[in-house]
Amino acid sequence: MRAPEPTPREIDCVIVGGGAAGLSAAVNMGRMRRSVLLVDERDRFMWQHVSYNYLGFPDGIRGDEVRRLGWRHAAKYGVSLLIGHVAGATREGDRFRLRVERVPEGGMLAGRPGPSVPRDAEMARIFDEVPETGPIEVLARTVILATGVIGHFPEFPGRNECVGQSLFWCIHCEGHESIDRSVGVVGHGEDAVGTALDLLVFTDRVTIVAGRPEGFDVPASRLADLAANGIAAHACGVAEFENKDGRMEALVLDDPARTRIPVEQVYTIRGTRATNELARQLGVELNPSGQIAVTSEQHTSVPGVYAAGDATSLHDHQLSAAVHEGNQAAFGANYHLYSPAQRDPSDPPEPERSSAD
């Protein structure tokens, strides 16, 4: 593995984010014999989540196992893997300069907790780390942003252990695991109401809690739909998410009686925020919700910059989609690196940058 040097050097591609999308992009760029650096902060507590709908794994596969296999796969093709935080990115002509800083162990970074995934022997063997002496700067011919989102789940003691075992957000991924279970849905909007009603396919023991003192933000007709289908609705916040050893046990309501609702599973339906700071710095177009706007081939509005995974999608946070999008982003980035003679003459040119760039 080629360790990053402490002075700027030019490489073919920097991939920001070591989730399924970033790792998929790394593998495919490495297989095209490109020089690739993947930068990962290691702060994804959701890697213990088990995916049961990923083709070829009928018994499910844990996210951390996908990740470990992805590390090995990318390293096999010469991808450099670096633990660090991309603190800044600028455009210099047709190149991109990225500054990578050290991630403090157990510290705070960009207003959020530091890494929750501990170093282990395999990570130490495969990954390098930004030295304490200062940031690393890299010049890249292409960039793939696989920076993900923030905000799937509320914060409470034991949350990280519950994610993927009894705390969910998507019935397309986990609804089948809710069959005949007592399920609580926490959310105040139409997405939450729809999720509660959709769960009736799997169980008739569903309760919904607004999760905020203002109550629900849906028409009265939707509350009537809940009642007509036997779903109790509580227009208040949640005072406590009772859990033990990764298993949800009850929702304690933030009402005068501190009502306790026994549950076996909880779906939290709340808005996520795309991690788009680097996209903004590079002048990449965002959609009205803040996700990175991409074409069907993962091109952004800036030639040479591609994006994949959750940061590009409002709804489709699934492993299979992330792997596909990372693959597509790699295809696009690799094609961008071709010489004119290697390109199809009938292909339209990439869009010119605006004069404001």
Image: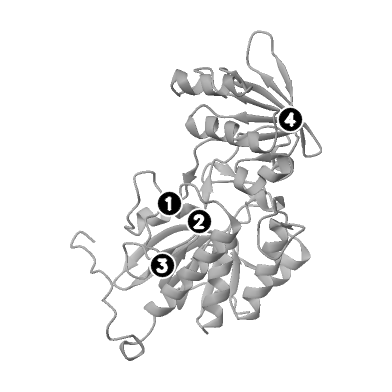
Residue where numbered disc 3 is placed: 297
Q: Nearer the viewer, mark 4 or mark 2?
A: 4
Compare marks 3 and 2 and give the one earlier in the sequence.
2
Query: Which dot marks residue 147?
Result: 2
Image point (32%, 55%), residue name: 285
Q: Residues within 10 Å of mark 4 (few under 14, many from 20)?
A: some
Q: Which residue is mark 1?
A: 276
Marks 4 and 3 in Cβ contact (< 8 Å): no
Q: Measuring 53% from the left and 17% from the top, which residue is drawn there?
A: 213
Is residue 140 at least partly visible in the picture?
Answer: no
- Residue 182's mark? 4
Rendering quarter of residue 153: top right
As measured in the structure, the alpha-carbon distance from the residue carrying label 4 to the one carrying label 3 is: 41 Å
- For mark 1, does the 10 Å Cα neighbourhood hold few (<14), some (14 to 19), or many (20 or more) residues? many
Q: Quadrant of the N terminus?
A: bottom right
Residue 188, how many percent across, how many down? Answer: 51, 26
